[in-house]
Structure formats: C-alpha cells, structure tokens
Amino acid sequence: MVHAFSRPRSVAGPQVVAPDAADARPRRRPAGSRDPRTRTALVTGASSGIGAAVARRLGGEDGWRLVLTGRDPVRLRQVADDTSATAFAADLTLPGADRQLTDFTTATSGPVDLLVAGAGAGWAGEFLDMPPHRIDEVFDINVLATLRLVRLLLPGMVAAGSGRVVLIGSLAGSVAVRDEAVYSAAKAAIGAFADSLRYELRGTGVGVTHVVPGVVDTPFFERRGTPYRRSRPRPVPPEQVADAVRSAVLRGRDEVYVPSWLRLPCRVRGAAPGLYRRLAARFG
C-alpha cells in the first residue's frame, strides 16, 4: 500500500494532510517487537533513478526494513512491490512533509538506522535563461528538503549511538559544470554540508557518506528538459551507484566517487585550479 499526502486547496495556509492519517500517526511498538538484527532504511527519491536502484539493492538483502518515498505514487508503488518495502508518496518540499514522513516511518518501521537522500532535480541551460521559480525548485529539492529531513532524523541516531546518513551528490558539485550553474551550486552545498556534519558528529557513532556520481543513466535528463549530449564521461547505470552506496554503508566510508576515476579531475582542480579552469573552458 502506498500512503500519500498533499496540500489541501480548500484550507488557507501551507499544510500537509495524510489521507491515511491513522497509519501515519506514531504508535507505541510492543517492547521487544523489533528484531535487533533488522535495521530500518529510509530512501528518498525512490520512485526512479538512483533512489529506486538503491531500494532494489538493499531490498535484495536480508536485514533491512525499507521505507521508500518519492513524488510519483505509481512508480513508487512498483518499486515498493519489487522490494517488499513500505511506501509513502511525498513531495518533501511541502511544509510539514518531512515531519509526516518521519512520524510515519517511526510508526511503521521503527527508528531510522540509515537515510539515503536520493531525491534530486536539475535544470540545464544558461543561467540568464533560467526561470526564477526553477532556481527555487532546484534548491528546495536538492538542498533544503534534504537538510530538513536530516535534522529530524539525526537526534534519534545520535541517541542510539549509531546510524548513517548517505547524501547523493554529483560531480557537478565538485568541479562545476557549464550550463548547470544552479545545479552545481546545489550539489556543492550538499558536499560542504556532508563534510561539516561529519566533523560535528565525530565520536557519536553516526557516520556521513557523500556519494559523488558522474553522469548516470536515469530519467533525470529527460525531466530537466535537456538531454545529455556529451561524449564523455559516459553514463553509468544507476545500479553501479547503488552498489557504491551499499559498499560505503558496509565499510563506513566518508566519500565515494562513481566511477572511481572521477576522483582524478577533482584532485586536479584542487591542486591546480588555474590549469583545470583552462582545460574545462576548452573542453567543457
């Protein structure tokens, strides 16, 4: 069953109402009812792309209780059926959506041990041509919604002395990409947030992983309105990113690049920024 919520048009002011409110309301779980060997993972952006691939990767293993969220209830239901997961269709940019999702997850599956923040949106083209509302949308989805959700889930992880937050970034945020100024800025914010938060959480038992994929073969490019036309780097399947997420969680890694050779241009930019900028201006 896919639970969902939306903003009612008949009520003034920003609100979020869950049609299945009884299911979304936190309930006390009987003592000892949670299998200590089973952990709860919450995956955002799970209706397609990287989020769906991560859900399927984790769903194929024992020991995970999955809660999936995404904005498309039809696709989300398909992924949930494939992974025996609980689904909660949500637009996390709506006021209160993060709280509804957090309460629902706690009520149905218990405290969250792993958050994989895979929701994202992009826009391609010259910055001067970008509609102002799309600027807000890119930052709302990629940055603000993610930070708000992490803020709600972290206290429980810190109190438990364990847990991991996985933030899906982008190579665009590490080196900046022509015609993707706002998307690059949003993903750069996620990378900086991951580093800063990791420093703060040192010694708490809670880890932060920043996953930096290059071009991934997902519907992302169709939705942003501009197809991917570059010959390099070549797109990788979302399953490769999902494998990297799983490996990073198991090994407790702070940062991973997909594919791994993408670490090289990031190092060149850091060591010789002038040279990198000249090469990027020439070759794009």
Image: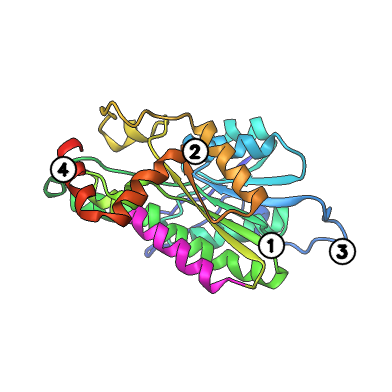
Asked which secondary structure carries label 3, the reply is loop
Q: Which mark is residue 12?
A: none
| 2 vs 4, front mark | 4
Q: Identify the residue position indicated by label 1 in the image.
A: 26
Residue type for callout 4: Ala
Residue type for callout 2: Ile
Mark 2 or mark 1, earlier in chain: 1
| 2 vs 3, front mark | 2
- Tell me if label 2 and label 3 are in contact, CB under 8 Å: no
Above or below, comparing residue 38 to residue 226 in the picture: below
The residue positioned farthest toward the left in the image shown: 128
Q: Nearer the viewer, residue 267 or 235?
A: 267
Mark 4 or mark 3, earlier in chain: 3
Mark 2 or mark 4, earlier in chain: 2
Q: Identify the residue position indicated by label 4 in the image.
A: 281
Taking the spot 56% from the left edge, 66% from the top edge, the residue there is: 152
Asked which secondary structure carries label 4, the reply is helix
- Tell me if label 2 and label 1 are in contact, CB under 8 Å: no
Q: Identify the residue position indicated by label 3 in the image.
A: 31
Count residues near mark 3 (Cα–Cα under 10 Å), then give few for <14, some for 14-19, many for 20+: few
The percent coordinates of residue 216 (x first, y second) are 42, 34
Is 201 colored magenta in this rendering?
A: yes
| 2 vs 1, front mark | 2
Q: Quadrant of the C terminus?
A: top left
Q: Identify the residue position indicated by label 2 in the image.
A: 50
- Report how far apart the C-alphas of labels 4 and 1 lie in the structure: 53 Å
The percent coordinates of residue 282 (x first, y second) are 15, 38
Taking the spot 72% from the left edge, 58% from the top edge, the residue there is: 110
The percent coordinates of residue 114 (x first, y second) are 63, 54
Looking at the rendering, the stretch of residues picked out in magenta corresponds to: 186-202
Query: Going by the image, does 136 lie left or right of 63?
Result: left
